[in-house]
Amino acid sequence: MAPSAQTHHRSHSLLLFQKLLNLRDSASPLTLLLDTLEQGAGPLLQEFINRGKLARSKILFVSFTTARKPRNVDIFIKARGRSVTALITEIASYCAPVNSQTPKDTATNSQKCLIVVDSLNPLASKQPHVLPLFFGSIINPFASLVAVYHNDVPLVLPRTVNEYEPHPLTLLSHMATAVFKVSSLYQAVETKRAQMRSLREPEWGLHEGREGVLVGLRTGHQPEGLVVEMEMRRRSGRAVAERFILSPSRGGAGASLSLLSDHPLFAPAKDAEGGAEGEMADSTFNLGLTEKQRNDREGIVLPYFDAQTEVGGGEGGRILYDMGREDDFDEEEDEI
């Protein structure tokens, strides 16, 4: 990729990621965050909340697993043990759409609402068929939803679910307009190093196969940050995918964002031609050809070219054999 095209791709990807984090211009009405036990989506979820607070949006936090109200959250709703209908009614009361007589361009930032769901697993496990109704009832032009789904949590479906129905995760991935999959930067770096050395890739947590291990052992020199795999679905149906590194800040400022390809270990390799030129530059003799040598080589006529131009060329052939003194002629042998 040319340097100018690479710079354009890098700038476009970072701007798109920033737009999704800011939820500007309703970039993604339904954003799905996929995490694991090894790397939770907490830092990315907090980044959504902080940016929504800076934009003066109303932040609603729907809690299934969180006990305390997070920072910068305006309304904290406890959803555990409540019916879906009651939950939809309460959320809709806080995020009512604007009056139809009000023009959209006069709507202020305070009318916008960010709904955060800390875990969709309880809802997907008990009533997976109500997920489209739940999303369709609370999402409107001035309300965006950011929800977390834990990939490692076992999902026990009720017996009433038909075996031919799609899995709740498949349904969620189909409905989401943007999907963010988070993973550990330390584990990504260790996996890349093993690949570069042609070694077996390390495993963590449940994949280790060790008895009693749920979360892999973490060392004290882990780099701060997490890898975010973005997949955004445009209205045309085309998906835009890219991988980023998100490094949360401790001082409360915005997190730093960068492409994973900007990491020294994940930087793309140089072109094979450039690498060959570099190797030839280090040698003590020239392995290339001059222009005169190249022209002389192209002007050589090989013997089999003349055989192809003779009469009958390409129509079959015969084998010519000259007998020597040591050869024993066999009269019964077919004539060659």
Image (tube, grey):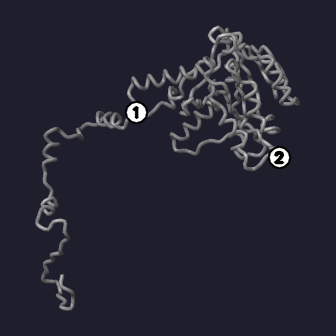
The picture quadrant where one finds residue 172 is: top right
**Above or below, 217 relative to 72:** below
**Above or below, 62 relative to 271:** above
Q: Residue at x 23, y 38 (%)?
A: 285
Q: Horizontal placement of 61 versus 15: left or right?
A: right
Counting from the top left corner in percent of width and height, residue 166 is at 71, 44
Q: Residue at x 54, y 31 (%)?
A: 236
Farthest residue, direction bottom: 332
Farthest residue, direction left: 311
Q: Which mark is residue 322?
A: none
Farthest residue, direction right: 81
Counting from the top left corner in percent of width and height, residue 289 is at 20, 40
Q: Which mark is residue 270?
A: 1
Q: Residue at x 67, y 27 (%)?
A: 30
Dot in front, 2 or 1 = 2
Counting from the top left corner in percent of width and height, residue 134 is at 77, 30
The picture quadrant where one finds residue 74 is: top right
Q: Secondary structure at mark 2?
A: loop
Q: Horizontal placement of 276 versus 309: left or right?
A: right
